[in-house]
Image (cartoon, rainbow, N blue to C red):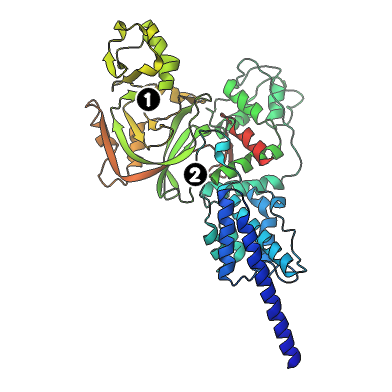
Amino acid sequence: APASTDAGVAASLEAQQVADAMEKAAKTEIARGGASYERAERAALADFYRERGWRPFFVGAQDLTAEGRTLARVLSESDLDGLEPTDYALTQRRAATPEARAEAEFAVAETALRWVRHIASGRFDPSRLSDLVTPRPPRPDPVAVLRGFAGSHDLAATLTAWAPPHEGYRRLKAELARLRAQKGETPMVRLPEGPMLSPGQKDERVALLRERMGLSAVASDADPDTYDPTLAEAVKAFQRDHAIVPSGKIGRTTLTALNEEAHGPADVVADVIVNMERWRWLPRDLGELHVFVNIPDYHLDVMKDGRSIHHARVITGRPENQTPIFSETMEYVVVNPYWNVPQSIVKKEMLAKLQSGSLGRSYEVEVQDREVDPGSVDWSQVSPSQVSIRQRPGDGNALGNIKFMFPNQHSVYIHDTSSRGLFARDYRALSHGCVRVAEPFSFADALLSEEPTGLDGAKLKKLLGRGEQQLNLKRHIPVHIGYFTEFVDDAGQLQSRRDVYGHDAKMRRILGL
């Protein structure tokens, strides 16, 4: 009995020494600087361990606890989610003293919180790409994360549940595993510039095109320079996968897409990882009913209960007038809208038209808040900052007949257009930054399918020609404008789109890919 008592006393003394070391380590951690979220994580850790009586959770007397070993296993598999496992390696496992154990415990716990933050909301601030990239990644609450750890009966499941819950993310994760399972590199050729290449033509580039499409050489009695039907079908399949009209013709758009993708599986893996990262920027709950715009795909979807109920072509911003990447909430629609011309467009485009007298009669012009007759002003004496221009409602209005408003810092919105012929083009990065939508009243029907007021596309159409009218929505609708150059479609096919704004290349550099 005395020996048993002595062992108990020793264990109690050791536990107290560890608790004292943990409390001291917590004070040291809180005193450290760093970003606000890092300070919040360390404060949460101090509270977490205080509630536990300063008992370690991940690090035992000799090695990691069962929870620590589970954490180490999950973190070692980070590559499944496009993360780098070496960034989360748990190097401090053994602790010879209470102080060393406390230090190791905090190091492991901070790594766990950092991993959760990275898998849930991304590894860098999206605004590093551009002032126009302003999503608000849902950063996890460290207090909730730690309480989830302590109360979990399956820590591995609790950890991995912090990955984005979206179907688009899960599909890319599966595609990443498939790509990595492929053996070897497949070198791809680049096609030289030249005139339009059509099925049936003879051209010395045809042999290169056949190699680019992964087709075997033609039979010995066939002409290798003839663009045959088998090759045409392969090209059409490529065009369909890249949202290009499947004509089989190799024009500028198809040539650009072929050459931009003239790289091997390792490059595709990097592109998939980049796009997985973008899913982390979105709210975990996109909304039962929401609008999802994919800028490089030039399409939007109205999503309801996880499926698309309306798919439409859109026109997005030019590379020099990029459509922003963000999420906001649609609050109202405007029928027969005026177009208040942005000052940037007044300066770059409109002032020259005013000076030449070619602005057109559909515009109202103000100089220093006074409406003027454009023909009566000496425009060489007027500063662009003094000029306000708006276009009256009507068939020629740049916004078309309707606009869908989700107030935001970028002053962009979804709207109709008077230039509807542009929707037939494959390359549709053509606007000043707003999103133009094809068939806007069909879009409105899907969008307003659950609007309590009963408002729909038909009722909106009845308002045409009756002056500008704003209609507030009782049910506000989330709008997510994203940028996904790689995604997996409903048929399980990886789809690739042109990196029209160059964001992929920037993200690969930031992520070290």
Instruction: Name the residue located 63 percent from the left edge and 67 percent from the top edge.
Output: 23
Q: Is residue 291 left or right of residue 499?
A: left
Instruction: Name the residue located 63 percent from the left edge and 58 percent from the top edge.
Output: 29
Mark number displayed over residue 207: none
Q: Answer yes or no: is residue 396 visible.
A: no
Q: Is residue 334 left or right of residue 19?
A: left
Q: Quadrant of the N terminus?
A: bottom right
The picture places residue 323, in percent across and down from the top left corner, at: 48, 31
Q: What kind of residue is marked 1?
A: Thr
Mark number displayed over residue 417: 1
Instruction: Name the residue located 58 percent from the left edge and 31 percent from the top edge.
Output: 499
Question: Which is in the foreground here, disc 1 or disc 2?
Answer: 2
Vertical placement of residue 3 versus 390, above or below: below
Q: Earlier in the sequence, mark 1 or mark 2?
A: 2
Q: Quadrant of residue 476?
A: top left
Report how far apart the C-alphas of labels 1 and 2 lie in the structure. Answer: 29 Å
Q: Quadrant of residue 232?
A: top right
The picture places residue 213, in percent across and down from the top left corner, at: 67, 30
Mark number displayed over residue 136: 2
SS for callout 2: loop
